[in-house]
Image (cartoon, rainbow, N blue to C red):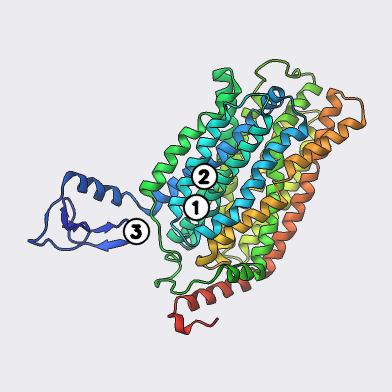
Amino acid sequence: MCVESDGCEIEGCSSSDEVRTLSGSMSPGLKSSPDLHPCKPGQKFRAALLRCRSPAAAAGILSFGNVLNYMDRYTVAGVVQDIQRHYGQSDSGIGLLQTVFICSFMVAAPIFGYLGDRFNRKVILSCGIFFWSIVTLSSSFIGKEYYWLFVLSRGLVGIGESSYSSISPTIIGDLFTNNSRTMMLSVFYLAIPLGSGLGYILGSSAKVAAGDWHWALRVSPVLGITAGTLILVFVPEPKRGSADQMGRVKTRTSWCCDMKALAKNRSYVFSSLASAAVSFATGAFGMWIPLYLVRAQVVQKTAEACTKEVCSSTDSLIFGAITCVTGLLGVVIGAATTRFCRQKTERADPLVCAVSMLGSAIFICLIFVVAKKSIVGAYVCIFIGETLLFLNWAITADILMFVVIPTRRATAVAFQSFTSHLLGDAGSPYLIGLISDALQQSYATSALWRFLSLGYALMLCPFIIVLGGMFFLATALFFLDDREKAEKQLSQLTRPPSSVKV
């Protein structure tokens, strides 16, 4: 017989059963007592609800929220050609949309990291989702004379999404450990390419179905509000560090101490710089590759430049589908490869990331070589290059979990997000647009030169990816030492306060 905290019996349980409490902990089943009374219908529903709050269900809901996070982010990229025509903007003006979004995202990340290490994380997550959903929906009603307001709305959306990206991985880190944590983080980070690809597909499909690109921004907010509600109801708030040791962390370090420790953590610093290289490439590609392929087809005379109210969405749909598939393959292959290589070397995590980055750079270079002659060949290179690039997303998060103690993980995730966006996709879409505009001004504007100028600008990406591979190799040099330091520090923090050295 199971007993809920208010003293009523829950039917259908044996004496050995357990009931999950609101805090996410497990309470052992108690034997029936004459003082107990039958549960009321509302109490039975509450008890059943609590039993649904398993770690696996929580990870699934958080992953669903991450899909929506990135879906909303790249819905705009799926209709970028329509937005450019509607507002009459240049390449650099359109690149500004993503840059403003990422700048607000990265500025807010450290704030949410601080809050996530000290307050209820799932409440912060839900509020963030509700906020960006409402702003996205509102932005779909902005008129063409208010482009600056549309840009501002993307900045506000970035603040809302920042709360989710900074905090949600730390909840998964506290629910699982070792290979289980690697697998669950892989599922969570699979949402990045999956959500990004679905963003292109959703934006293109909604635009075609409604005959108006504004409807692309009116679907994801409904799903976002649903995800926020599910998080509030079904996701527990685990104790920080509960998956890493039996005891509870008895000592919390100050924010200044956290920042000093992270700055001295060489594995964390180098892996963050490598993440910045990945962000630079994915940010630029996500914004410009569909438009680049459209211009390639115009040069090949297999398509015409868009002069209609609703532009063709074929390339956005194909690129979105490729991103979904390569994301799935990349994360799965990355997790499997890392698990296998751990049997050979303890430095497997950063080494797998480094090799995948260097391999990705080769195929991304080939995109710009073959695109002028063969769109199919360009898609093949995109497929292989993205698969290799996506290998490292979940592994990078796992590296952070190994080398950073639980009480500062949200701060670590937030500042890794901050640096990767600051040095990566905060500027890359706008920078590529600026280079493309500058090159177009050098010669008479033509379809061929518009295509070539954007391609030359995008050639910056493979060089940045190679640099990221070098940073992962540097991470491999210090990974074992930093992991050992984190384990020792964690054992100190779980002792009574009097025994901890300051």
Near-viewer residue (386 or 59): 59
**Alpha carbon separation for disc pair 2 and 3:** 23 Å
**99 relative to 2, above or below:** above
Residue position for label 1: 168
Residue 390, percent from left and from top: 63, 47
Residue at 64% from the left image edge and 42% from the top image edge: 101
SS at circle 3: loop
- Can residue 448 be seen? yes
SS at circle 1: helix
Residue position for label 3: 23
Instruction: Answer with mark 2 or mark 1, whichever residue precedes in sequence.
Output: 2
**Alpha carbon separation for disc pair 3 and 1:** 17 Å
Residue at 30% from the left image edge and 57% from the top image edge: 21
Is the residue under label 1 in contact with that under label 2 (CB below 8 Å)? yes
The quarter of the picture where the C terminus appears is: bottom right
**Alpha carbon separation for disc pair 2 and 1:** 9 Å
Instruction: Answer with mark 3 or mark 1, whichever residue precedes in sequence.
Output: 3
Number of residues whose C-alpha sits closer than 10 Å to that of mark 2, classed few (under 14), some (14–19) or many (20 or more) = many
Residue 82 in the figure: left or right of residue 246: right
Disc 2 residue type (three-letter): Asn
Residue at 63% from the left image edge and 57% from the top image edge: 416
Give the residue furthest to the left: 34
The quarter of the picture where the N terminus appears is: bottom left
